[in-house]
Amino acid sequence: MSVLHRIPGLFLMALCHVVVIYHMLERRYGKGKFVFLSCLYTASFVCMGAYIYSVGSITAALTYLVVAVCLFLFFCIVSQECLPKKSFLFLTYFGLFSIIDNSLKLMVALLLPHLSGLAGYYLVNVLRTAALLLILALYKRYAAPMMQSLADIKKGRWWNLALIALLFYLLQATVTILLYEKNVISDIYLLFIFIVISLVMCAVYAVVFSNISYMKKDAEAELVRQNAEYFSGRLSVLQNAEDTNRRLRHDMRHHIDMIAAYAKTGDNAAILSYIGEYGKEISEAAVRQYSLNRTINSILSAYACKAEENGIDFSVRCNATKELEMREIDLIALLGNLLENALHGCQESGKENKSIEIHIRLQKKILIILCNNTCSDDLKLADGLPAKKGIGISSILSVCRKYDGNLDYKIENETCSAYAVLNL
């Protein structure tokens, strides 16, 4: 089979890699730059493959290694995941790619021995691409939300998973090399070995995804902890307000006596001044109502008190309805972390005049949250997010993705703006 006949198959393989990576990873760049880099990768892959086929003397092991390294580099360039998570996803995907590729080649060789080399080559290419796209669709439907919810998992845990994936990957690589090296082992024995390794893979990944499930539960537990903290702060606010109201009711008789004393002397100016001071005290003691939604109101009230304690102006505009079609724990993680980051941003800014503005709008089934806060001059952004992305940003991102939304940050005039959009 000539090199020219193989080029369309190489192009299809590279295109399949690009599509899978686009939907599987957290991309570092926008669509335009990703397409540009994908075109470079595809062109390089096709040229490299054509060269390897034209030379013909390059060993199967070296060929497999070169393909794997090139694909991993593309993974690293276009993804903003941490290195251990990139490694886990790459090893898992390429191991799966090897399973499907090996399976189809063995089945074609055993079941269709009289098929021409060119026909077998393209049959394997087309079936492999269809199988990978089907698995990608299943991944996006069932596994992607779980993987995206693990944004806050420590790197050490991802390294553990990557090492497990590496063990399976090496076994699959061995099968692949044996498959390419002719006359090393018969197809029957090779198929038997492949089935055994695939069964081992199933057992290993059962453990892997069980581990991921526990990691997800840990992430949920962290959100529950945040939930408890926010409502604990809100409870403290309500208790303080209740104590103040109880004191005001207790002192009511003394206030009436004082007003009566001023009235007897005919000092109307003193009466009005006293009533004004008393009304101001009652107003300050009242519990503020920011939103009809109880959860939103609780979080806003708690952070309004924190802002006041730190000398930060706090303003709210909110039209959210009493009930929202999202889990309370997700709402707390989103809004609580936005306000927590805004509070820290104001405290670290070093500015004399500090402020937090929060705008919450529900438009049909789209929840829009805009949080503006005074920020430090040293704050830098990378790809629309703070360059130093902590656990709070990761939690916000996780919630936004869960509801098919997005998160974007901007800095202008010493103000950091976080813009979150969710589809409820």
Image: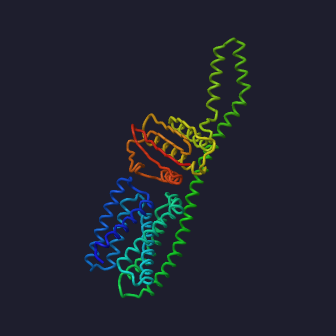
The answer, for residue 236, to whether it is visible in the render is: no
Residue 124: give x, y in percent of width and height: 41, 75
The answer, for residue 294, to whether it is visible in the render is: yes
Q: In this rendered view, identify the residue nearer to me: 21 or 311.
A: 21
Residue 111: give x, y in percent of width and height: 45, 83
The quadrant the N terminus occupies is: bottom left
Q: In this rendered view, identify the residue nearer to me: 44 or 390.
A: 44
Residue 181 picture quarter: bottom left
Point 32% across, 67% down: residue: 45
Q: Residue furthest top?
A: 266
Residue 163 picture quarter: bottom left
Residue 226: give x, y in percent of width and height: 57, 51
Point 66% across, 17% down: residue: 271
Residue 61: give x, y in percent of width and height: 34, 78
Judged left or right of residue 301, residue 414 is: left
Residue 281 picture quarter: top right
Q: In this rendered view, identify the residue nearer to me: 12 or 239.
A: 12
Point 60% across, 51% down: residue: 327
Judged left or right of residue 420, residue 243 is: right
Judged left or right of residue 337, residue 242 is: right
